[in-house]
């Protein structure tokens, strides 16, 4: 499988055309960014770790009945995925209060949320990914009410499955964001699921094992990602 034309380059991934109909090549780079791309660094092995971590999670979700865009690994830092028409929407679930919700609502970091909160955000770095609701999505034509309901339902399913997966490895899935797209009239989980797009804490110490280590200058970012993978039984 050979890379074709580069179609898109995001903060940490690039997307390439390929010779398989309805598919694309997703390349995980070593770039690590924070604050909507204002701070960017290169971290050795990060692309490899995130590619393999994402493949593991996507395959786990597929086995549990969640349709994803992931098809197969094609190299250490590349995956073959379905070509989706992506919605400009981020679906976020929070099991524990941390990050932006604490700043917005003035709540204490680390409060367990029962039931978990669900939020939509518009995927737009220039606007700093503003929070939106179902009414915005439908009125501006970003997705139909039916698709919005389906995305929300699938996100809660993902949360139930992955919260247990991490809990069984003595970790807390604090929060995560996922994105969806369409191919041939079907909704698929797209983009990625890696420590770049979620918060993961050690269940006993609440040590941060995700990209907050980069945001907060704690160091050991890739090492933390590798630890999470290994605790889930994945060799990276």
Image (cartoon, helix red, strand yellow):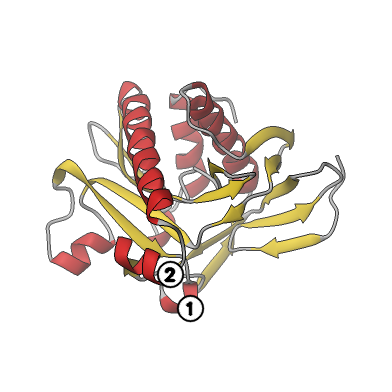
Q: Secondary structure at mark 2?
A: loop
Occupied quadrant, residue 186: top right
Expressed as whole percent of the image width and height from the top left, the position of residue 55 reads 59, 33
Say if mark 1 contacts mark 2, CB within 8 Å. Answer: no
In this rendering, would 232 be left or right of 2? left
| Residue at (62, 37) in percent of width and height | 70
| Residue corresponding to mark 2 | 35
| Residue at (48, 72) in percent of width and height | 125
| Residue at (24, 54) in percent of width and height | 98
The circle on residue 89 is none
In this rendering, would 134 be left or right of 117? right
Viewer-proximal residue, 161 or 106? 161
Say which of marks 1 and 2 sits in front: 1
Viewer-proximal residue, 56 or 178? 178
Viewer-proximal residue, 112 or 89? 89
Badge 2, how many Cα within 10 Å: few under 14, some, many 20+? few
């Amino acid at each position: 499988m050979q890379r074709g034309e580069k179609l898109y380059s995001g903060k940490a991934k690039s997307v390439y055309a390929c010779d398989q109909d309805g598919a694309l090549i997703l390349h995980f780079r070593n770039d690590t960014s924070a604050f909507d791309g204002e701070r960017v660094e290169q971290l050795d092995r990060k692309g490899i770790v995130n590619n393999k971590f994402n493949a593991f999670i996507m395959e786990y979700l597929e086995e549990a009945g969640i349709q994803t865009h992931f098809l197969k690994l094609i190299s250490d830092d590349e995956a073959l995925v379905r070509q989706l028409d992506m919605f400009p929407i981020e679906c976020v679930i929070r099991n524990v209060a941390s990050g932006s919700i604490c700043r917005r609502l003035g709540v204490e970091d680390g409060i367990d949320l029962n039931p978990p909160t669900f939020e939509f955000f518009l995927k737009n770095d220039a606007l700093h990914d503003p929070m939106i609701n179902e009414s915005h999505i439908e009125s501006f034509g970003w997705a139909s009410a039916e698709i919005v309901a389906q995305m929300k339902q699938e996100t809660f399913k993902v949360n139930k499955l992955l919260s247990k997966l991490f809990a069984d490895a003595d970790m807390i899935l604090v929060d995560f964001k996922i994105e969806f797209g369409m191919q041939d009239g079907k909704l698929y989980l797209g983009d990625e699921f890696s420590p770049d797009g979620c918060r993961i804490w050690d269940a006993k110490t609440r040590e941060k094992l995700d990209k907050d280590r980069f945001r907060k200058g704690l160091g050991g970012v890739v090492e933390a990602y590798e630890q999470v993978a290994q605790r889930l039984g994945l060799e990276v």
